[in-house]
Image (cartoon, helix red, strand yellow):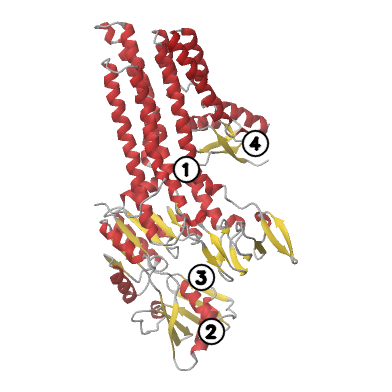
Amino acid sequence: MANRDILPIEGVTCTNCAAKIERRVEGRSSVASCQIDFAASRMMIEWNEPNDHDAELQSIEQEMAQIEPGAHFARKEATGDHVNHLLWRFGTALALFGVGIWSDSLFFYAIAYVIVGYDVVYAAIRNTWHREWFDEKFLMTIATFGAFAINEYPEAVAVMLFYQLGEYVQGRAVRASRRSIQSLLTMKPTMARVLEADQEAIRRPEEVAIGSRLVVLPGELVPMDGRVATGASSLNTASLTGESLPKSVEAGEPVLAGMLNLDGRLEVIVERRSTESTLQKMIALVEEASAKKAKTEQMITRLAKIYTPVVVGLAAIVAFVPPLFGGTLEEWVYRALIFLVISCPCALVISIPLGYFGGIGAGSRRGILVKGGQYLDALAEVDTIVFDKTGTLTTGQFNVTSIETNGRLSTDELVQIAARVERASTHPLATAIVELAGEGTSFADVHEEPGYGLMAVDWEDRIYVGSARYMEKLGHRVQGARVGTHVHIVKNDEWLGRIELMDALKRDARETILALKRGGYRTVMLTGDRAVVAEAVGAELGLDEVTSELLPHEKVEAVERLVKDGKVAFVGDGMNDAAALARADVGLVMGGIGSDAAVGAADVVLMNDEPHDLLTAIELGRRTKQIVWQNIVFAFFMKALFLILGVWGIASMWEAVFADVGVALIAIANATRLIRSTKKDPNRG
């Protein structure tokens, strides 16, 4: 039996309850750790080899239901049952409540209360028994019992009715915010059509090897990352990149798992295992996001632990101290009950994480994968944007513009020698040279010196291919490029020639930089390219600062200097950028198929590989933080106002219900705005 279970759950709509469930499950001797992925509705359990696995899960499910009624492990046939049951209870209790008001009968009030509130009371008693003393269910139970005790029957039932209404709407809002995240988690292809001996066989993607030939028919998902061998079609890539326009592909072009084939028949050669696909990386990033809470979220979680005990203590003071100086005990107990209802922290404990889930979900729908709420906050605070050049502001697709030799060999011979070395590299410059050379062999013994170039050993000969700086390091003085990028080739001590390549700006790079400058951001470019090339690009884009000819470790040092002066976002494409991405306050990697090291080091992945998505990410961070703080300020202000009114006897239990449920619903509605459209202009004026 596996030592780890990942189990879908339903009915957990409260982050406070999720934390309690985690603590309770981790307290079992059979469980090493338990984590609830609130965004994806899953529980991850690490086991200490339980004796009876099924019995343990059944017992855990019972504990879940005790803490949050209706919480259970998800089963397809049970979907929606809890919601329908809650609506039936609410409708029945509301009708009996109406009869109670008409007849002024305690009997009907009591029946209505039991139907709508039995699960809340049961959970409060069970939690108290397990020393989980203070939560919103405890507050609701004490407040409504107290209202019955002082003959305020309508208020007692109304509080429970509106509390359950708030729970229902809250649950719907949570499910809506989760859907945008879970749509990614559930789109993983489950079958692959493999071509074997001219026959199609259905296999699970996990069973398909690299190099296999797949058939993808119209209407099917591409099951694995690969390259089109034959055929042409249009692919819907919205699930991966957020791009609404279909992408046309033909033979030789890459396709990714999760893309939807719209029209033509494709044959695809598999290039990555299913566990290493771009889609799988995206799923892992989104799963990781829920575990990384923003500082605001952490603050609210810590506050909730001390908030309720303090509130109960203050309510006790309101109930029993003022009668010693004037007024009746019943009057002040009523005010204390109002105090308890108003102070319920629902608006804060759910609307804050809901805001971050909304931001993460909205980003994933646009091809912007944010690893956690803390990085949304960081995006909102940055004032300096640092860019790598190649592959970030420029296309990274180089074209050979000129070839110069030493006169002892032809240009074609020079290209073939360089290509035999460059086939060992995935650098864009190497790719361009290899494509120009066409099919051919490579040297068996090739060594890379990061930031400089490559060295191949061919019997007694040593062939060096790389930058002018590499040649100078080897003791060869060569003439540098004026505008383009040059790759030099040296054999032993003889300079053979150089190949000039040019890189074009990305189509939206200039507009992105202009928008950032309008927003007041400082723009910086750090690149390993030559000064003359870097300065030309910087001047064309209007960057504030350009630093060139940097080795990877020098990029990190430059980022560290910038971090001392402000909040820094570093945007790179994965080529030698992993360390700089990790060192910045927030690192953004361009493109969904960058290096694993860069994707692992980055905090945000921009799947579309377009600079303007940086604007969307910044605006997403700013809007998320704005909405979260709107909810915090609004909830505290309204509760403080009604608490004062309640203590002074101006607010009744009905106003208390609004201050609790009404404020929570308004805050939740505000948080769900993030699920809708996100602007792309980060102007701060």
Who is closer to the viewer here, 636 or 442?
Answer: 636
Under circle 3, the secondary element is loop
Real-space Cα separation, disc 2 to disc 4, in angstroms: 59 Å
Which residue corresponds to the image point at 60% horizontal and 80% vertical from the top-left? 441
Which residue corresponds to the image point at 26% horizontal and 64% vertical from the top-left? 544
Of the numbered discs 3 and 4, the one sitting upstream in the chain is 4
Q: Nearer the viewer, mark 3 or mark 4?
A: 3
Residue 240 lies, in percent from the top left, at 51, 55
Left or right placement of residue 314 versus residue 391 in this view: left
Residue 170 lies, in percent from the top left, at 45, 32
Amino acid type, label 1 = Ser
Amino acid type, label 3 = Thr
Q: Callout 4: 10 Å neighbours few (<14), some, many (20+)?
A: some
The quarter of the picture where the N terminus appears is top right
Of the numbered discs 3 and 2, the one sitting upstream in the chain is 2
Q: Which residue is mark 3?
A: 426
Assess whether mark 1 and mark 2 are in contact (beta carbons under 8 angstroms).
Answer: no
Residue 126 in sight: no
Q: Nearer the viewer, mark 2 or mark 4?
A: 2
Real-space Cα separation, disc 1 to disc 4, in angstroms: 27 Å
Q: In which quarter of the view is residue 565 placed?
A: bottom left
520 in relation to 38, above or below: below
Under circle 1, the secondary element is loop
Q: Which residue is mark 1?
A: 290
Of the numbered discs 1 and 4, the one sitting upstream in the chain is 4
Under circle 2, the secondary element is helix
Real-space Cα separation, disc 2 to disc 1, in angstroms: 50 Å
Q: Nearer the viewer, mark 2 or mark 1?
A: 1
Q: Which residue is mark 2?
A: 416
Q: Callout 1: 10 Å neighbours few (<14), some, many (20+)?
A: many
Q: Which residue is mark 4?
A: 49
Amino acid type, label 2 = Gln
